[in-house]
Image (cartoon, helix red, strand yellow):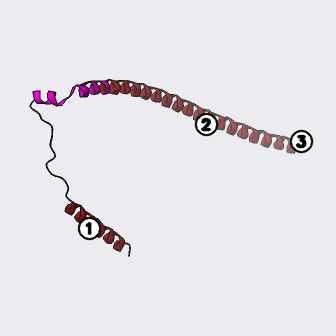
Amino acid sequence: MTKAIVQTYNIVHEYRMKISLLFVAASVVMVLFYIANVYSTISRTVSIQKINLEVTAIEKVVENLDAQYLGLSSKITPDSLNVYGMSQGKVSEYISKTSYTALGRAMNVSNVAMSAHEF
């Protein structure tokens, strides 16, 4: 009887050790996943902060360029164009009504072609 008890104790002790080692290994794996996730979160946060700093710097540059553009464009007048040998543009041709109706017919043809494609 004592032999059976000792054998049962040895089997139980062996399985207890295997289960304990399994829990320890699972814990180590979970800790490694946790460390990887924390590192990933920290590196992404640092990257986002760097990008935000770059965005604010670029926004400042764009604001300065906008201010310079508005300052320069407010100085442009027809008289200042003459100094540089430029003149105000003139419209040389208007779209006539006949070309507009031809354009409408072309659009109708394309609509018909598109609707015929559905069949």
Q: Amino acid at mark 3?
A: Thr
Query: Disc 1 and disc 3: Cα gap in Å?
Result: 106 Å
Q: Nearer the viewer, mark 3 or mark 2?
A: 2
Residue 96 point in image, percent of width and height: 19, 58
Residue under the image location 12 percent in, 35 percent down: 87
Q: What is the residue that sits farthest to the left in this orientation?
A: 85
Does the residue at mark 3 contact the one at mark 2 (Cβ under 8 Å)? no
Viewer-proximal residue among 102 and 23:
102
Per the image, is 81 magenta? yes
On the image, the x and y values in percent for residue 12 come to 79, 42
**What SS does tag 2 mark?**
helix
Is residue 113 within the magenta segment? no
In the rendered image, the quadrant that contains the N terminus is top right
Q: Residue furthest right?
A: 1
Q: Which part of the image, by quadrant, shows the C terminus?
A: bottom left
Q: Residue beneath label 3, please?
A: 2
- The tag on residue 116 is none
Instruction: Name the kind of residue labelled 2 in the image.
Output: Val
- Whole-Å distance between the Cαs marked 1 and 2? 72 Å
In the rendered structure, find residue 29 and report the number of the disc placed on it. Answer: 2
| Lower position in the chain sequence, tag 1 or tag 2 | 2
Q: Tell me where the magenta segment starts and ends, as one range.
A: 66-83
- Say if 100 sits above or below 48 in the image: below
Q: Residues within 10 Å of mark 2 (few under 14, many from 20)?
A: few
Say few, some or many: other residues with alpha carbon within 10 Å of mark 3 (under 14 / 14 to 19 / 20 or more).
few
Q: Quadrant of residue 101?
A: bottom left
Camera-side mark, 1 or 3: 1
Q: How many marks?
A: 3
Question: Residue type at mark 1?
Answer: Arg
Residue denoted by label 1: 105
Residue 26 % position (x, y)? 65, 38
Q: Between disc 1 and disc 3, whose residue precedes?
A: 3
